[in-house]
Image: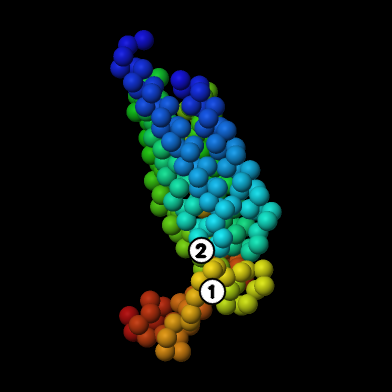
Amino acid sequence: MSGGTSFAEMLVAALIVLGGSFALVGSWGLVRLPSLMERLHGPTKASTLGLGAILVASIAWFHLVRGTWTTHELLVSVFLFMTAPISANMIAKVHLHRLRQGEPSEPAGPAGAPAPPPGGADWATHEAPHEGTPGDFEGD
Amino acid sequence: MIAGALAFGFAAFGLALALNLWRLFRGPGVADRILALDTMVINVIGLIVLAGIESGSGTSFEAALLLAMVGFVGTVAYAKFLLRGDIIE
């Protein structure tokens, strides 16, 4: 086996180890961090990054074995990197919604529940569309 | 070298799935459980990609892509249901 091949193998192995470590750290953060808003950080950043490393390792490995570039993995990683922030935003919205309803099963973080916006307004999830918001068709 | 790295990767993703299961059962809130399910989908995609590397066949990536899509739609559906009381209004 030539020197170049073994370097490529080392690269793939290092990427797999890196990806596995990041995914593990993300899930450990999901268990260890004290409140939901903090727990959101682990999976959305560390786990997504770990999966990205695994997908890059897969691209490199199939190039090494077959000598062809595959794009399936790129598709998966692009889709994942696009959707991870959206699902995190939705989960944070659910958390805020249930905090506002006073659900006893939904504890606030160490900083307490977030204060309502000033001026008698409500959080955007709950406000009816009014002037200046995207749902206000008359003002558009 | 690849075999050792793959073994480490499988162990890491498996342990991550176990930790997610703990959070899924422990809660305490509904948002925590949705987050745990979303993370489980991400970790399972990692396992599928690792299995694809090990077997050397490219057929598992369709499964990974499908799981990424279904996982995202599932998370959004859970969140929508809790936020609006309905999934498709």
Residue at (59% x, 52% y) in the render: A31
Quarter of the rendering containing residue A2: top left
Q: Earlier in the sequence, mark 2 or mark 1?
A: 2
Q: Position of residue B83 (x, y in %)?
A: 57, 70
Quadrant of the drawing holding the C terminus of chain B: bottom right
Label 2 sits on a secondary structure element that is helix
The front one of A21 and B86 is A21
- The Cα–Cα distance between marks 2 and 1, rounded to whole angstroms, is 11 Å
The front one of A106 and A60 is A106
Q: Check disc 1 and give the amino acid type.
A: Gly
Which tag is nearer the camera, tag 2 or tag 1?
1
Q: Which residue is mark 2?
A: A37
The reply to whether residue B74 is visible in this rendering is: no
Residue at (55% x, 68% y) in the render: A109
Q: Position of residue B33 (x, y in %)?
A: 62, 57
Q: Which residue is mark 1?
A: A112
